[in-house]
Amino acid sequence: MELEYKAAWAVKLLNFDIKSAKERRSIQIHELEEIRYLVYKSTKIYKEKTKAYHDKRIICRSFEPNDRVLLFNSKLKLFPGKLKSRWSGPFTVKEVRPYGAVVLLDPNGGEFVVNGQRFKPYLADMTIIAGEEIPLGDPSPAQ
């Protein structure tokens, strides 16, 4: 008897109108799809901003064969010493491969491949030509 009462109460509560239940469910599904679309758009915007930030920080470096470079030593973490430099070298560029890979020659004659983002130009061999004058005044025509 009590079970029948609860079942009748549930039928009255739900009102088993198929049309209105179908419309409600359809509206809920559309709202869910709209929320999914908004999440997709915001995720896409986030990924584009992250990619732009990453691409902005990449330094475009171009090296030619026989250039001298210093290599960043990223493995120098255990007891590096306070004043110890993380740059080792100088090394000589043997070959520049596509997608940023570079073949380096060490002073002993061995060669190894390194990512181009891990090194910088070695400028100690550059010499300044003495005796050359550079005028710092206005660039007026000589009279």
Image (cartoon, rainbow, N blue to C red):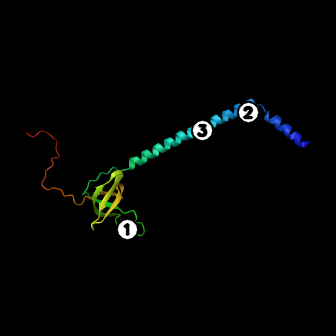
Q: Decide if residue 110 is on the left or right side of residue 81.
A: left
Q: Position of residue 100 (x, y in %)?
A: 35, 53
Q: Nearer the viewer, mark 3 or mark 1?
A: 3
Q: Decide if residue 86 is on the left or right side of residue 64.
A: right
Q: Which mark is residue 82?
A: 1
**Which quarter of the figure is the N terminus placed in?**
top right
Tag 2 or tag 1, which sits nearer the N-term?
A: 2
- Label 2 crowd bin: few (<14), some (14–19), many (20+), radius 10 Å: few
Tag 3 or tag 2, which sits nearer the N-term?
A: 2
Kind of residue at badge 1: Lys
Query: Regarding mark 2 in the picture, which secondary structure is present there?
Result: helix
Q: Position of residue 56 (x, y in %)?
A: 39, 47
Q: Position of residue 110 (x, y in %)?
A: 30, 66
- The residue at 42%/66% (across/down) is 77
Of 141 and 51, the residue lying toward us: 51
Kind of residue at badge 3: Ile
Q: Quadrant of residue 138?
A: top left
Is residue 131 positioned above or below 52 on the image?
below
- The residue at 75%/31% (across/down) is 18
Q: Are the residues tagged 3 and 1 within 8 Å (C-beta)? A: no
Tell which residue pokes out farthest to the left in this image: 143
Q: Nearer the viewer, mark 1 or mark 2?
A: 2
Residue holding disc 3: 35
Kind of residue at badge 2: Ala
Query: Regarding mark 1 in the picture, which secondary structure is present there?
Result: loop
Q: Which mark is residue 21?
A: 2
What distance separates the C-alpha of mark 3 from that of mark 1? 53 Å
